[in-house]
Image (cartoon, coloured by chain):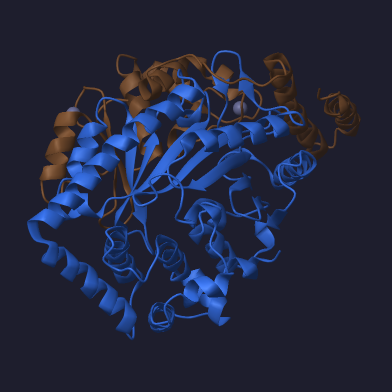
Chain colours: A brown, B blue
Amino acid sequence: MKCQQCERPATFHITELTGGKPQELHLCEEHARHYLTTTGGEPSGSGGMAAALAQQVQQMAIGQTAEELAHLDQQACPVCGITFYEFRSQGRLGCPHDYVAFTKQLEPLIYNVHGESEHVGKRPRRSSGSSEERTQLIRLRREMREAVENELYEKASELRDQIRRIETEQVA
Amino acid sequence: MEIKELTQTSGEWLRGDGPEADIVISSRVRLARNLAEFPFIRRATPQDRVQIERILRDAIIHSQVSNSLLYIALDELEAVDRQLLVERHLISREHAEAQGRRAVAIDKAEKFSLMINEEDHLRIQVMQSGFNLQSVWQQITAIDDAIEQRVTYAFHERLGYLTACPTNVGTGLRVSVMLHLPALVITRQIEKVFRSLQKISLAVRGLFGEGSQAMGDFYQISNQITLGRGEDELVQQVNDIVPVIIDYERQARQFLIKESQENLHDRVSRAYGILRTAQTISSEETMHLLSSVRMGVNLGLIPKLQIADINELFIHTQPAHLQKRTGGELDSADRNIERARYLRQYLNREEGANRAEKN
Ligand SMILES: [Zn+2]
Ligand SMILES: [Zn+2]
């Protein structure tokens, strides 16, 4: 994660509690010292994780044309339907598949936050293949709802059977 | 067990014992997990929330993580009861204030809580009094394993456990230790704490009182990064830095004693005196004074009290606890009167009476 006031890595993470709402600050050593020794500090206008994320997405976007940016923003997850713009403004993803659907946008952001890009540590005993398969249920349920709304009852019942099949598959 | 019973007790993590309990209030670890087959909470429909809750409730109950589980549907709970759970750190403020189907499972000793439909589908949290991260990690990973046998977590081969916010992806692990650092605050050395954390990305947070004002002397240290390091390493990182901070605080206390034992004793005695005699007192002032008294107890300046008493007062003087105790809604002015009444009653009891009553 980069310092909110310069390009160096943020090694201080401070929650400012004075005044109104708590704000999260991510600063390098120099800016943190400056912040902590200046009375009152100067709370940055952009508190909160969502804002920090949005800012990083903006940093990442530097070097891309407005057209490319707009394209990235409009891209939607085929499973849950969230657009990258919606994620960017809320700071929360729509479904597990977003990590696949928005790989291009999320990779630099994740690296910015964690300084790493690969998980080490605990993993479920079940294979991750079954995890991705079950995530498709989100898409199927959404398609079924849409079919019902459009009075495509035959399609809806086919989807329902398909959903039931996956749902009842042994989870072991 | 009923919610009301909680007002008679203090949670496990407030027992005031365990390693370094004079400075370390509690050790806490939480894991963020999501079911593979549902959207994350922000995008979940009301039916999704109902299904997520049902699946996780079944998994939790059948995995027998505890034989005395209290399962609470938060959407059916009154606001004051939800606030009570927030004050006891059993659910988050966001979880209390959210809408729609959501729940929490708590073990009777309040050692852990499992929040359903919080920011992630499942947030497992284990807490313990004092400095004991290894033991807390052992407990939480066992609970996680037991639940994982019954559900499919959202997991990515390369990115690990998938979470609603990319800041938690990977291990989904947050390790935090709550510290009481009054001497570092008095001696204005608290920045030293921040400086000691510079090399390893750790977060420092002040603790919130009523509203969002800092309770001054309480700080929570936690890991900022969740990806690319194993759980053991993340736990170890916090585990390594806490003794350094404890040492700073101890040195600052010794400095205060050496510099002027009288000033320190005076500060503690005045705080104690106000708490025992005030007729109306705000939450913030209470926290501030209790902090001084807590340090006084640790330094042997108030032999009559124990750390467990102070920890209990911290929780029992908060708004929802006061209202549950009196059995009615109180506005802020009435709460201040009730808080002062409660403090006077508790602190003016006969010596030893506090302990005896609990047995
Ligand atoms: Zn900087
Ligand atoms: Zn999605």
Give the position of the C terminus of chain A as an image quadrant.
top right
In this rendering, the count of numbered labels is: 0
Question: Where residue A16 appears, x then y in whole percent?
Answer: 27, 48
Task: Choose between A16 and B306: the one closer to the eye.
Answer: B306
Q: Tell me, yes or no, if residue B161 can be seen here.
A: yes
Tell me the quarter of the picture where residue B234 sits: top left
- Tell me where residue B76 sits by quadrant: bottom right
Task: Give whichever of B145, B328 is nearer the camera.
Answer: B145
- Counting from the top left corner in percent of width and height, residue A124 is at 66, 21
Residue situated in front as seen by the camera: B153 or B28 = B28
Q: Is residue B225 above or below residue B328?
A: above
A70 with respect to B272 (left or right): right
> Which residue is pictured at 54% across the width and 81% down the height?
B326
Q: Quadrant location of the N terminus of chain A?
A: top left
Indicate which quadrant contains ligand 2.
Answer: top right
**Is residue A46 at least partly visible in the picture?**
no
Q: On the picture, is B281 further left or further right than B4?
A: left
The answer to whether residue A48 is above or below residue B327 is above
Please tell me which residue lies in front, B203 or B135.
Answer: B135
